[in-house]
Image (cartoon, rainbow, N blue to C red):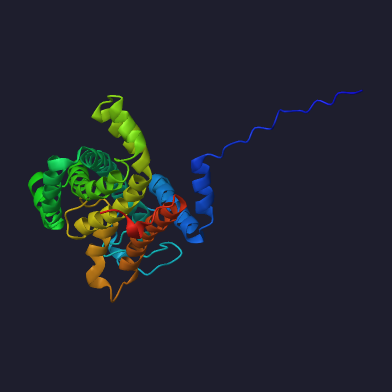
Amino acid sequence: MTAITANTTLPEVQKQSRWKQVWKNMRRSPAGMIGLFVLCAHLIIAVLAPYIAPHDWTLQNGYIMLQAPSTEYWFGTDNMGRDLFSRTLMGGREAIMVTLLGTLLAIVWGGLAGITLGFVGGKVDEWLMRIVDALLAIPWLLFLLLIIALTGQQSWTLILTLGFFYGIAVIRVVRGATLEYVPRDFVVAAKTRGESRLTIVVKELLPNVLDALLVEAAMRWAWMLLAFSSLSFLGFGVVPPTPDWGLMIADTRGMISIAPWAVMFPALALSTLIISINLTADSFAKAIGLDRAKAPV
């Protein structure tokens, strides 16, 4: 009699990484992938702009002022005879650098403050949130203009002021997301074990609100780009002759009837960057199961 032994070794089921699943979900969104492609293109161009710009973006030539687009000057020239294509390529470098650092600052301090307030609760949370509400009621653009007028137009000033103001709004969103997790068992268990508040905030709460924080970062970045461009348009952003899209639009807006290309191309570059960020953020939010329309406030 032959004994039959069953092979009890089963093949291991490889658990799919959560971020791989998120990427898989994002790939199902054509709009999200288009947005991500355009966003990556903007970032690559910003890095490589000094090497791929065909002309000197600061060189003025009075003989070719407001020249229409041609084979030599693809986007035409501006009111000082500078190559618009080269200036448009370079125009996003300062804006992207300043707003990325400003967004990082806003997310770090606003995120940690929001998680801490949501976790602590009580009178401390109540009183500090009233201060946050009061700060949100301040007309931020006027306050930014005042700070920049007092301290100057250095990049670090713009980064700190933008990061501070946009971090205030992050506090509300992240606090709302944190309140959902504070009563959960794993937080209660951490309290019971005697873990410090900092440990609970960093190890227990932060990983659970990270998705909402990343989506919020993308939204704040898009709004910060608009704010930075508005400041440049008003003359409080980058210092000439550094090219910037907002400044380029301001310099040539009075000539839109005779040289529409001088306004159109920098405006198109700025709008495509902001739209691509929003499309990517929307796609990412849906991929992780977060509804931006119902985000906590």
Q: Position of residue 264 (x, y in %)?
A: 34, 67
Q: Is residue 62 visible?
A: yes
Q: Position of residue 292 (x, y in %)?
A: 35, 57
Instruction: Identify the residue at the far front of this view.
Output: 1
Q: Residue at x 65, y 32 (%)?
A: 12
Tell me the quarter of the image containing the N terminus. top right
Q: Does residue 221 appear left or right of residue 72 in this picture?
A: left
Quadrant in the rendering for residue 257: bottom left
Q: Is residue 54 visible?
A: no
Q: Residue at x 19, y 56 (%)?
A: 231
Residue 173 versus residue 124 in the image, above or below: below
Instruction: Identify the residue at the far right of this view.
Output: 1
Q: Residue at x 29, y 51 (%)?
A: 220
Tell me the quarter of the image containing the C terminus. bottom left
Q: Does residue 276 appear left or right of residue 262 in this picture?
A: right
**Closest to the observer, 290 or 35:** 290
